[in-house]
Image: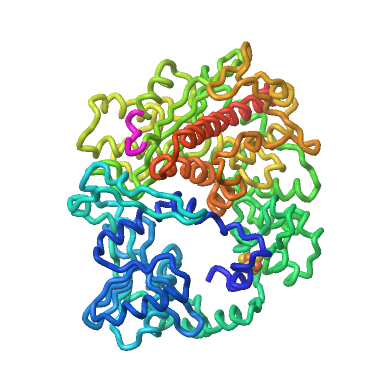
Amino acid sequence: MECPTKLYYSGKKEYADQSRQDPFLAALADGGFQVGALARCYFPGGHMIGQLDDQAALTETARLLRQENVMLYEPAFLYENLFVRVDILVKENGCLRLYEVKSKSWNPVQGQPFTGKKGNLTAAWKPYLYDVAFQAYVVGKAMPGYVLEPFLMFVDKNAECPTDGLNQKFRIKRVSGRKAEVQIINLTQEDLSVSLLAAVPVEKYVSMIMSGYGTKDFDPLGFEGTLRYFSKFYGRDERITPVPGGKCEKCQFKCSEEDEETSLKSGFKECWKETFGWEDQDFKDPLVLDLWDYRKKDSAISERKLVLADLDEKDIGMKDNGNDGRPGLSRTKRQFLQIEKAKTGDFSPFIDRENLGREMGRWHFPLHFIDFETAMVPIPFNAGKHPYETIAFQFSHHVVEEDGSVRHAGEFLLADPGVFPNYMFIRKLRAELGNDEGTIFCYSHYENTVLNAIHRQMQQDGGQPEDSDDLLAFIESISHSSSGNERLWQGTRDMVDLLDMVKRYYYNPSTNGSNSIKYVLPAVLQSSECLQRKYSKPVYGAEGGIFSMNFKNKRWIEKKNGSVADPYSLLPEMFADISSEEMQRLMSGEDESAIRHGGEAMTAYARLQYEEMEDFERGAIVKALLQYCELDTLAMVMLYEAWREEVS
Ligand code: SF4
């Protein structure tokens, strides 16, 4: 439904596919393993069809469904050339109840979010509803004569976990390469006495979809006609004519840099070549898809404005005052800067020295640079806790003194299985930051969001720590209250968001429009001679050099083909058994802050929590986590150093 042309590329080995990620990692990262296993615990006594091949699964499903009443996990159904596996199916008294289990969180007090004010299906929930509608359609056709009741099962974020240690009762074991099984250990009736999952009846919405009400996505053929149309093309292995648009930005059939070096084909390039008559060299210019935060990509592409050089002020609706009266670039001015630099082939960075210098003049030494790593797990650690609470398990901290000296001042990592780390995290953070009045820096609003989450947890927690008043006061001193928090505050040392500074005062064309620190760091190193001079020597972690907790005599400037190599590429891979390319896939398709906070570290944490592994494997992951997080705060320091050189 995102784009029917994708059906053609899907499953073909010769095409690059950024979503063809390791299913083991994907399920670890989003909690899918645990949620699936927990859902089955709430429906005890079913038959698992499991990891049989498609034909064997169909035969076994049909055999078991001869029983009057039966419950099946992962049964298979086929109608014409449409095939589905259902998560849980309950056959009872002539009725088939179909449960599609999702690890998405659900807020039961929000009412029903599936339709908007005008009765149309809401974009955020369509993928889930279409998924279950397709399942209901195939099962209904394969099993005529039954009353069909479809449900979506989500994780109820308001449910309170009834017991301690439930989280650790769902262990994960990799079996035969990419497959994994969940081992449930010592689960009790009390563990299941409160359901952490909500079964939401969706029959009404499935009927709407099938009858073409509340969505235009199936026009003009209707739901059934669209399925037939898709399946006809898929069955004949023909490509549905592509209609490129803004959706192509995140198309999974683009080649990564590594894919380009192999013989993998790019579905993205094939679509654009076919539609626009392009040749390979046309893809070398920056595309309209690369323009930062541009919301009119569809209309620009429909007018055949395909590269940045095709755009002008009118296309972006340039405004001078789009920055809430704050100094620096507005969103549209920044976009125009990106366009202008692309048009003139200017790769030099833009820096608003005057405004940035004024801002930097207000900062107090020593400067503190911090970065958090967090996870959200569906099954809580302790009784009384809710699913998907923020788990803050790691931070790194660098300090810059007024004389310019830098040190890795501290770090925290607590990923022991089953241990809720948040209060120890905040205690250690206070010990690191609470001894002076220096300015504190983060990169993105994420750190503020995490501190708000811990603030809320501490207030709601029945078993509050004894020092909670001190910890709450500390949080309020270095952050500001975000929406949804009952208490309002603005800390005297509220953190300075360097990402916000980048957006307003700095643009480096080598970032290709991304403001993620993972792109900004290599770009800054490439363009800053002072950083190149300083970090081309092995001073980091050297005696008499820059103190580091995790590196020794590290040289951060390495040249590859005349360019400065991305420092993140100089770190060992986070997991010995998973390539960095696979990790990139795991992280693809997310927004900038999610890339930093949602990918490798979160997966590493999930592995340390749930996966059966040897001590040496655990040690290697912990070491990699510490190095990555240290580089995250060092990257912020380097950005600061480059700016200081520019404005002094
Ligand atoms: S490149 Fe665009 S048109 Fe082609 S498959 Fe991807 S999203 Fe669809």
| Residue 250 position by quadrant | bottom right
Residue 181 point in image, percent of width and height: 40, 55
Does the segment drawn in magenta span residue 231?
no
Residue 342 lies left or right of residue 238; in this view the side is right
Highlighted magenta segment, given as a residue range: 417-424
Label total for image: 0
Give the main secondary structure, helix, strand or loop, of the magenta stretch. Answer: loop
Q: Can the viewer see residue 112?
A: yes
Q: Quadrant of the C terminus?
A: top right
- In this view, 89 is above or below 575: below
Residue 594 lies left or right of residue 73; in this view the side is right
- In this view, 181 is above or below 147: above
Q: Can the viewer see residue 488?
A: no
Instruction: Identify which residue is drawn at 62% across, 36% down.
Output: 568
Instruction: Identify which residue is drawn at 64% across, 41% down.
Output: 519
Q: Quadrant of ligand 1?
A: bottom right
Q: Front-most of 631 and 183?
A: 183
Q: Residue furthest top?
A: 544
Residue 199 point in image, percent of width and height: 28, 64
How are the colours assigned in the image? rainbow
- In this view, 192 is above or below 409: below
Residue 137 point in image, percent of width and height: 41, 80
| Residue 248 position by quadrant | bottom right
Residue 623 point in image, percent of width and height: 51, 31
Instruction: Identify which residue is drawn at 29% across, 78% down.
Output: 96
Instruction: Identify which residue is drawn at 36% across, 38% down.
Output: 417
Q: Front-most of 512 and 540?
A: 540
